[in-house]
Image (spheres, helix red, strand yellow):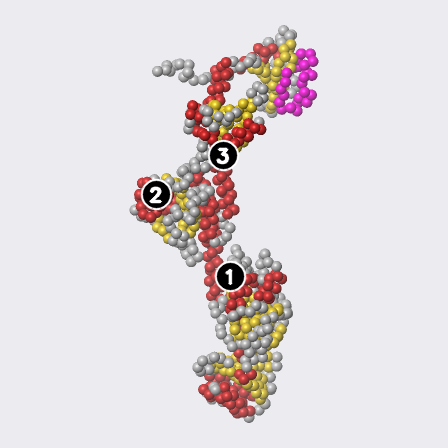
Amino acid sequence: MRRPDSTRDRPVRSADLFDEAATARATVDERGIVTGWSEGARRLLGHPSAAVVGRPAALLLADGAAADLPGSLERLGRWSGKLTLLRHDGSALRVGLLAHHRTTADGGAEWLVVSPLDRTEPATDDDGLIRAAFAQGPCTTAVFDRRLLLRWANADMERVLGLGQDQMRGLRMSEIVADGRGAEIERQMREALETGLPQRLSLLPSRGNAAWTTLLAPVRGADGRVLGVVLSGHDVTVRYEAQRRLALLNEAGVRIGTTLDVARTAQELTDVAAPGFADFAVVDLLPSIHPGGDGPPPGPVPGTVVLRRVAAQSALEGRPDMVIELGKLAVYPEHTPAAECLAAGRGVLLEVTPEAVARWEEDDPARAARLREFGFHSTIAVPLRARGATLGVAAFARHRSPEPFGEDDLLFAEEITARAAVCIDNAHRYTRQREAALALQRSLLPRSLPRHAAVETAFRYLPAGSLAGIGGDWFDVIPLSSARVALVVGDVVGHGVQASAAMGRLRTAVRTLADVDLPPDELLTHLDDLVTRVSAEAGGEPGGDVTGVTGATCLYAVYDPVSRRCSLARAGHPQPVLTRPDGTAAYLDLPSGPPLGLGSLPFESREVELAEGSVLSLYTNGLIQAPDRDVDKAAEALRALLTRPAESLDELCGTVLSTLVPGRPADDVALLMARTRALDASQVATWDLPSDPAVVARARKYATDQLLAWGLDEVVFTTELVVSELVTNAIRHAQGPIQLRLIHDRSLICEVSDGSDTAPHLRRARVFDEGGRGLLLVAQLTGRWGTRHGPTGKTIWAEQGLPGPSE
């Protein structure tokens, strides 16, 4: 037993550590006056402190010694050299000095001059001190000879390698560390021997190994010959892990949230986490996180929870370590990490012990079996929270990496999960708003187009896939009187629910104005007034906002299958393409009207004659305009596509859209195609009538004979009454010329035209009135009736259904 007061156990005192007299020290101010003089200085030169302090330091220099000082001493921060100084007995002493220029406590400046007193050769004790210092030093150090055999290793090297010197001496590094790391160190050693230059090597961690920076320096003898190599290793695992986490955080900032898709954003989180941070990563969201759900609940979620798996990634190809498939629901009891973190509202770090696995086995045997099979040993679960609401859980686990998660890993997992949660919440909010806009848009757009004798139609509608959201594009096919049809395509500038709502208002307005049978230019004028008025009501100026949008464009066309003429007008809208029956296609040169909402600017119509079988293609600008596309080239590509033969109009419509817009467009795309038909001359009968009451009977006879020729015996009586009333009204209340026309299509249309602009009005006749019942009778006998105005008068028409098939 050692005695407690033995020298070996005695603590080191400060008096034993420092000897103030072991060096000579003096201070000199900026004026060159000595301000301090140590006991060591007295021992060196023999001058007592009282004889030196307060006097010029130059008095201590021997003759000519000042020449050894540099000329710009004041500008130096430090100087070292030798000076000849005067001892107290007047003798000269050559002394090595080190001088520091420093700042004093009161803000002044001074020189601290020091000189060692003991310059003797190292003693034998120094040898032992130096050898012990190298052996016990904190740096991992080893020495190899020219054959690269280990000759000596310090204690830290023994600790790192887990071998003593006796076990390693005489072996090469590739034999001590039998993997790629040992071979790489040995290769660098050989480089140091051959070049005589130091080498630096960084060794990254793998399979639980630490990260190292290794310095290899050649050892030279007195004659300069290289005797061997000294290895000095520095464990930089902490710094490496910090840099790696910082790099992962930067990667997460770049890779997570590239889209506004919930599933893809969640997958981006798992892709960043595995395998860089964890061996397995998943994202499970609450079932309410979907477009039709109620949205995320506020605060923590206690108790057993049900989650939907939306993303997963694994270090193993094919993700064999995953139990729950993507899109499936799973129940997480209270004791599971997912439920614990949701209840606590913060991340949890857990060791996967056999006891924990056995407990989970009661609830989910398949999950427990997978944990045992792959050796899961450490897991982190972090709640996905954004804006005070809980979205779900991100879980990270390790089974291939031997190192368990630590507290630093938990902080890192919480950091990347917090970033991802904001992106997922943004994506969820965007998706809900997009779905609401799509639902509104679907409710306002036609789901199918009516069959019409005048045209065969096909359409495509593709909502925008950009971050801006759903736009306000629309299209419509509107049956008009006398077997005519209106084709319309429009585009509200803007995106979102407001654009869809504005589109609905404009589409309704177009249908209402079309029902009045206005020509295209007049219809656009009324529509322009509506946009201007609504904008003003919303607080904007003319040409400004329409329920949150900045304007609209529209193309309106009316086609008459009897005359085969089509009248078109556009308000800031792209020109339509006309494909003739011979397969050639060209853009129709229509007058360029201004966009709707500018006000006070006229619109013009153009009338063209269309051969039967012509195809008129109307579209919105999203079909040919895109940020990465030349508009002129896209317009030419559209024209070329419309010349291709196709089995059906619907097939051609699909080909055009898939070719010009192969992916999700930046803006909504609406495409409407109409192939024209013509009514045969045998289906139309026309008679010019004089303005004479006696002609009414003759008009009835004309109509009856024609109906019998068409085989429409069943509607003769009704048609006679309609013709009689309409012709009588024209003779009594209007002026010539008067014309009667019958059109036999899917229905029977009876028209009477006159030269008057006065529109008839339906009124209720009193009991003793002799007239006033004509239009009321027409309205009762026919399916629908109306009036349209033309350049030289008006036409009153009535339409009645035909019995049996309408083909």
Question: Whole-percent x and y of residue 121?
Answer: 55, 13
Relative placement, left or right, of 774 versus 52 is left
What's the residue at 33%, 45% (across, down)?
A: 368
800 versus 507 height, above or below: below
Q: Disc 3 marks which amino acid?
A: Leu
Relative placement, left or right, of 292 versus 649 is left
Q: Which residues make up the magenta segment? A: 56-82
Q: Disc 1 marks which amino acid?
A: Pro
Q: Secondary structure at mark 3?
A: strand
Q: Tell me if I can see residue 309 in this picture.
A: yes
What's the residue at 49%, 34% (across, down)?
A: 203
Q: Nearer the viewer, mark 3 or mark 1?
A: 3
Whole-Å distance between the Cαs marked 3 and 2? Answer: 32 Å
Q: Which residue is disc 1 drawn over?
A: 463
Q: Tell me if I can see residue 413 in this picture.
A: no
Membership of 62 in magenta stretch: yes
Q: Which residue is disc 3 drawn over?
A: 203
The image quadrant of residue 66 is top right
Q: Which residue is disc 2 drawn over?
A: 372
Q: Disc 2 marks which amino acid?
A: Arg
Question: Whole-percent x and y of residue 698?
Answer: 54, 92
The disc at residue 93 is none
Going by the picture, which residue comes out furthest to the front? Answer: 147
Q: How many marks do you count on the picture? A: 3
**Mark 1 neighbour class, 10 Å CA radius: few under 14, some 14 to 19, many 20 or more:** many
803, 784: nearer the viewer:
803
